[in-house]
Amino acid sequence: MEKELKALLLSFDDEEQCECPQNFNYLDEMKRVHSIKSQIENIIRNKLRIDDQVQDASFFTELAIYKKSKNKRDYPCEDFKGTVWLCDLGIKFSSFGNMVTISSVTEGDMYSKYPIEKIIEILKNNGYIYIDSESLNESYDGINKYMDEESTWWVRYFDYI
């Protein structure tokens, strides 16, 4: 991980708080996300779902496009009769430091499917700090006393905890 990125991640870390800093205002932050949702939808020419039910997590919402899985390996068992939905494009908003990341769990390169650089530009123009999801897979070595030795920076800022 680059030194500058590490310093940034550490600057938002908190020894006690796992889900959000004490000064976090959920309603204000959700208004910000709603205000950029249509901007992003206009450039991707697709509707985004907004997850406003996130709890017990270090992020507070996600804008996403889901695709139905056609691959049996994604199903929990051989005789599963339900539908498995995978995140084709996920824009996660951390509760810490106006950080945001973009990821996908479906096959293929999200950069070839979506105008990621334009999405990042919109996010930055609206005061968010974009963090590449690959960098977040490194082991967490910050100051939060509740993160364990198996935690990553992804878990610290963009996952359920």
Image (cartoon, rainbow, N blue to C red):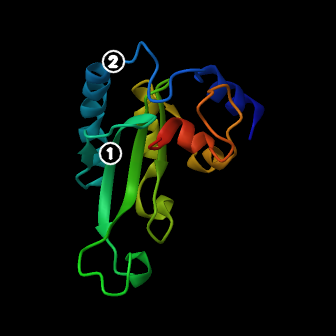
Quarter of the image for residue 125 reads: top left
Q: CA distance from mark 1 to mark 2?
A: 18 Å
Quarter of the image for residue 127 reads: top left
Residue 80 is at least partly visible in this image: yes
Q: Are marks 1 and 2 in contact (CB under 8 Å)?
A: no
Q: Is residue 130 above or below residue 12?
A: below
Image spot of residue 144 (x, y percent): 62, 27
The residue tagged 2 is 25
The residue lying at 58 percent from left, 22 percent from top is 12
Horizontal side of residue 68 vs 114, given as left or right = left
Q: Is residue 47 above or below residue 132?
A: below
As shown in the figure, which amino acid type bears the numbered disc 1?
Answer: Leu
Horizontal side of residue 145 vs 26, given as left or right = right
Local secondary structure at mark 2: loop
| Neighbourhood count class around disc 1 (C-alpha, 10 Å): few under 14, some 14–19, many 20 upward | many
The residue lying at 46 percent from left, 50 percent from top is 116
User: Quarter of the image containing the N terminus?
Assistant: top right
The residue tagged 1 is 63
User: Looking at the image, which is closer to me, 75 or 106?
Assistant: 75
* N-term mark: 1 or 2: 2
Q: Is residue 23 above or below residue 118?
A: above
Numbered tag placed on residue 132 in the rendering? none
Residue that protrudes farthest toward the right in the picture: 3
Local secondary structure at mark 1: strand
The residue lying at 29 percent from left, 81 percent from top is 80
Image spot of residue 106 (x, y percent): 44, 67
Horizontal side of residue 153 vs 59, given as left or right = right
Question: How many numbered tags mark residues here?
Answer: 2
As shown in the figure, which amino acid type bears the numbered disc 2?
Answer: Asn
Q: Is residue 66 above or below residue 84?
A: above
The residue lying at 46 percent from left, 19 percent from top is 21
Image spot of residue 140 (x, y percent): 67, 39
